[in-house]
Image: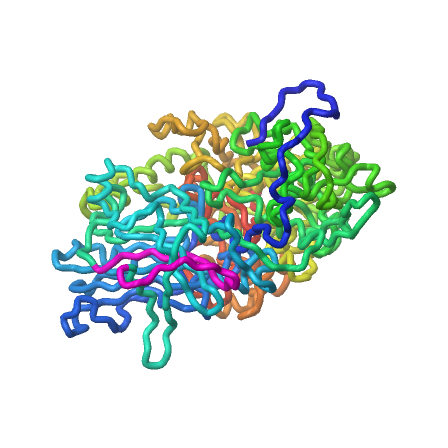
Amino acid sequence: MARYATPVVMLLALAAVITAPDRTRADAAVRNVRIVDFGADMCGFVYNPYRNLAPYQVRGLEPFLDKDGNGTLDNDTVSGWPFSLSEPLSFPFAPFYDLRQKSARLYGGVMTYAVNNPERYVSEGMMNANHESRDDFNFMGLGAGKPIPADELLEAYGLWLWQKDDFLNDGDRHAVAFAPDSYIAVHVSRYWGGFHAGRWVVREGEQFYVSEKTFGDKDELIDGAAVRDRYAKRNPMTHRTYILRPGESRWARYEPRESEPGRHATMDFDADAATFEPRRFDDITAVGFLVIRRLSPATRAVWDNLSVHQTLALKWYAFRCDAVVRRPQRGGYVVEMAPAAGGLLLGVRPVSFAQWERIRRIGVTNQYCPGLGELGYAIRCDGAMGAMEADGRSHTAAEPVGAITWLDAVAWCNMLSEYEGLSPAYYADAACTEVLRRVVNRNQRELWGSAPTVYWRQGAEGFRLPTRAESPGEDVLCWEGPSAGALLRVARNPADAPDGAVVFRQPSWPDLADLAADPDTLAAEARAEAERLQRVRLPVGMASAEDGDPFGVFATQTVIREARNDRFRGLISEEQLAQVTRENSPPDYAGRPTYDLEVGATEVPYRTWIAVRRWAQRQGYSFNYAGDMGSMRCLFDEGHAFSPDEPVTNITWHDALVWCNALSELTGRRCAYYLDAEYTQPYRQALTFRLDTFHGPGYPALPAEVLEAMGHSAPADRPADSNSATRIYLDADADGYRLPFVQEFDRLGPDAGHADAATLAGQALAVEGGAPRTGPVDAGQPDARGLYELHGNVLEWAWSPLDSYLDVMGKYPLNGYGCFSMTVRQTAENTRRYQDATYSTRPYFGFRIVRRAK
């Protein structure tokens, strides 16, 4: 982790001389690079089942294997998603599942075979969002939730594969081989129960092979009884990264097959009957892993937490494979490089937003195999398409990246170096052993303004900023210091450059350009944009004083949630759960009187957002995310132009609240959101925590005051304020701007919460079967009340007194069923409101404003 220096005067001079050999200066033809790097914040808190087929849709498949050998299939049950190399196993619809993330598409299958229990089936086969602050894939076998029959036998296989077409670092176009130090790694997270073994899988050409080596060198049934009795209640398989160097194992042929006429798909593997031999891999076309449960009596998978009737339980969230790609040697594969004076390699042109975003989303993540080290990056600014924050024009991702700091540029150079298998140029320590990855600590508010000391290893082979002498006359970011508005151009030393000295800088955060702008001009521009917002007066207001602090409701809802969990685990009865629910009933909004609201006719467009945000920052407001033009971060690599008339996206709920307060102050109205119950401290600094940069175990910890009010204490393994959240109070009588309640949104139009397919089709901006994208906020026709896109474009942040913004599991509702996020058919069939963490941000989250009409 980067060390944050205290304010002292430091020299830009020699700190140390590096004499250790640079291992990446070996022959580039045998240099390992990432070919698969799965693990990213890919989905929100929504149901993302394999192949978009829910578990109930893959039950009761036709039995075809007589597993117990009794001569009949009458007592056999098959459930799951059959093996396929042509249809991805992952959820197929963007952007609910981010198909543009690294290695997002995976193949394979998940199957169970049960004997003497027709109600045994896969109960979960999907990607869970925000569980222990990561998105994990799962394989769960609860079945109908009924007691396990004494004579039930169970066999199961799960196979997850990445194919050559999706290999990184040009592995999709060139031959891929394993070198002695190549490796395959997978991280098992919360659960491993009911399985005998995990093994690695490699396809050489058209032939699959399975490793003799197993995860943790174990091949035994790890179930609840084993964990309780043999392993002292500590599961030896969970929260571990399993790493294999392929040459350390022997390999056996493996013959999974897809369904064909007259033949069923199967993934079966019998290690006892297999012949394992040493093998060299020179034409790798797929990599992955296989989990196996041999036919054996069904048992409880986990000794605590889960239901006593659960027979299978597996969660994993990261997979990586590093191998050699036999590609032509170039100075850069993401950024085009050309020779310059003195053998230097210099980027042919400034780094584009598309290039920036491609590498940023690879580096900035907390979902990687932690057994490989702390690899996640944290930067301050996420970048913009050119000058989109200032000029009010349309932009594309082909433009140079803008709106980044010098430290962000330094970190990005390291991301690019590590991605291409090069030694990074920048470090957090003088000995250059600690790669500089985190230029800001978002987990603790008091460290937000700190900046790390940067050590440049001058002889490193990786990408770096040029010096001023290397880029004369150009307005580019240079090693010597930041320059507001400068472009990012990267440089590289030649491969045979000698190791050089280490020099360092202790930068401060550079002033944002807006802070130097004329405040009166910013205010005038912001007011003009605010006046352009269309509003409709409707009698739908429901907020009252009792909604001012939703924490009390949160406490009662927490009791209900814990009771539901106890019922799932079999600790209480259905009657006891009903009693708890009655005793903690939330307020009833159905009969509450209403009053007039001024309702935003459209979602807030980017042009209004950015004008108010620029003014607000000059007034001391701060935001976690800068905001995007519509779906630009979904479609950054496809050449689309994005307009400032599209909805602002990629902002958190907290950003929206702070912006509402800024708009209220700008227009002379009373703010709606406060940090105290007396309404004296407006909420002006947005929560800085980010899910993708949280590197602690489990969930982030809430502040001590919140934990104390909930009757909990701070976790010992992380700071009590790692989330930096705080209680926020709503002044229901304020005439300032706020988010609409969920209940108010549902009153905005006829059947507003569940529009029919015809209404959706009239409002949808996405084309069936095409790449979804946003459009202008006032495109199409308004509804009968003058409102645009209640169910189109993006999902909208809400204020919900019945749901807690403090919920670390992310179960906070958003308004609408945005057609940008789903096809019309899917949206019409979806009966559940989308939920996510208030500190999450997605390229399909925006908001509209309301204000109490006086």
Asked if the stretch drawn in magenta spans residue 65, the answer is no
Residue 838 percent across, percent down from the top left = 49, 42
Instruction: Tell which of 206 and 164 is nearer to you.
Output: 206
Instruction: Tell which of 459 and 11 is nearer to you.
Output: 459
Q: Is residue 613 visible?
A: yes
Residue located at (58% from left, 32% from top):
433
User: Which residue range is magenta in the image?
Assistant: 272-295
Instruction: Tell which of 659 and 99 is nearer to you.
Output: 99
Residue located at (37% from left, 37% from top):
553
Q: Is residue 602 visible?
A: no
Residue located at (20% from left, 46% from top):
570
Q: Is residue 618 above or below residue 317?
A: above
- Single out the residue that lies furthest toward the bottom: 261
- Single out the residue that lies furthest toward the right: 473
Residue 845 percent across, percent down from the top left = 55, 51
Residue 130 percent across, percent down from the top left = 43, 45
- Single out the residue that lies furthest toward the front: 278
Q: Is residue 693 above or below residue 283?
A: above
Residue located at (36% from left, 68% from top):
255
Instruction: Tell which of 797 and 720 is nearer to you.
Output: 720
**Left or right position of 222 against 415:** left
Rendered image coloring scheme: rainbow
